[in-house]
Amino acid sequence: MGSLTWLNRADLATLACPYCGRMADPASPEVLAAEQTWGFVGASLTLRGGRTAALLVTPDPETRTAMLTCLWVAPGWAGQGRGKRLIQATAAGLLSRDVIAIVARGSKAMPRCSAPPADFLRAVGFSRTSDERGGTRLWRLDLTTTAMADGLRGWLAHWVRVLRPVRPEPAGRTASKH
C-alpha cells in the first residue's frame, strides 16, 4: 500500500498533479497558515520511491474546519484505496489538532484535483452541505460524530506510531539498575 508521510511547504515544489500539472504555491497565505496551524499542509503516499497519491488542506480558523484543496491518485493507482487512506489519515491528524470537519468541493461532470469526484467523497463519508457565507454547495466530513471520531482515534493512534517511531537505544548500551 506504500508509506504515508506528512507534507510540508518544501514538499510542494515537487508536487504537481499528474493530470493537470497544477502545483500549490508554497508561499501562499493558506499554505503558510496550514503549516503554522497544524505542522503539515497535507499527506502523500509513496511506493518504491514514487508518489502514488497526495492530498492538501488549508485551515479556516473561524469555523475550525479544513478545506481540501487538492487530492489526486496517480494514473494506474486509482481504485486501490489510496484516496481513502489519505482522507482517513489526514482526518485523524486534523482531529488531534481540534479541527471539527473537512470541507471539499466535489464534481460530477469534470472531476479534477481541486474538486474530487462526488461519488468518491460520498463513499468516504462526506455529505452535501451549503456554505452559509457563499451559498456554494460543498461536501463535508464531520470529524466530531461519535462513530467517525472513534474510528479516527484508532487511525490517529496508528499513524502516530507509524510517523513517530520510538527510537531504540544505541547498540552496546545496557540499562543500569540502581
Image: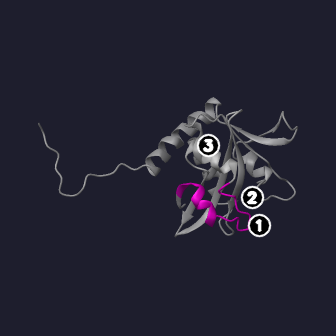
Give whichever of discs 1 and 3 has the lower sequence position: 1
Q: What label does residue 113 carry, if any?
A: 2
Is residue 21 within the magenta segment?
yes
Identify the secondary structure beneath mark 2: loop
- Secondary structure category for the residue under label 1: loop
Q: Are marks 1 and 2 in contact (CB under 8 Å)?
A: yes
Q: CA distance from mark 1 to mark 2?
A: 8 Å
- Residue density around tag 2, few if under 14, some if 14–19, many if 20 or more, within 10 Å: many
Residue 18 position within the rendered picture, expressed as x and y whole percent measured from the top left: 70, 68
- The amino acid on which the numbered mark 1 sits, given as a three-letter code, is Cys
Circle 3: element type: helix
How far apart in space, not on screen, are marks 2 and 3 (Cα)? 18 Å
Q: Which residue is mark 3?
A: 91
Q: Residue at x 65, y 65 (%)?
A: 77
- Which is more toward the observer, 146 or 94? 94
Can residue 128 be found in the magenta stretch? no
Callout 1–callout 3 Cβ contact below 8 Å: no
Q: Which residues are magenta?
A: 4-27
Residue 81 shows up from this direction? no
* The quadrant where residue 55 appears: bottom right
Give the answer, above or below, for where 14 lies relative to 89.
Answer: below
> x%, y% of residue 147?
62, 33
What residue is shown with label 1? 20
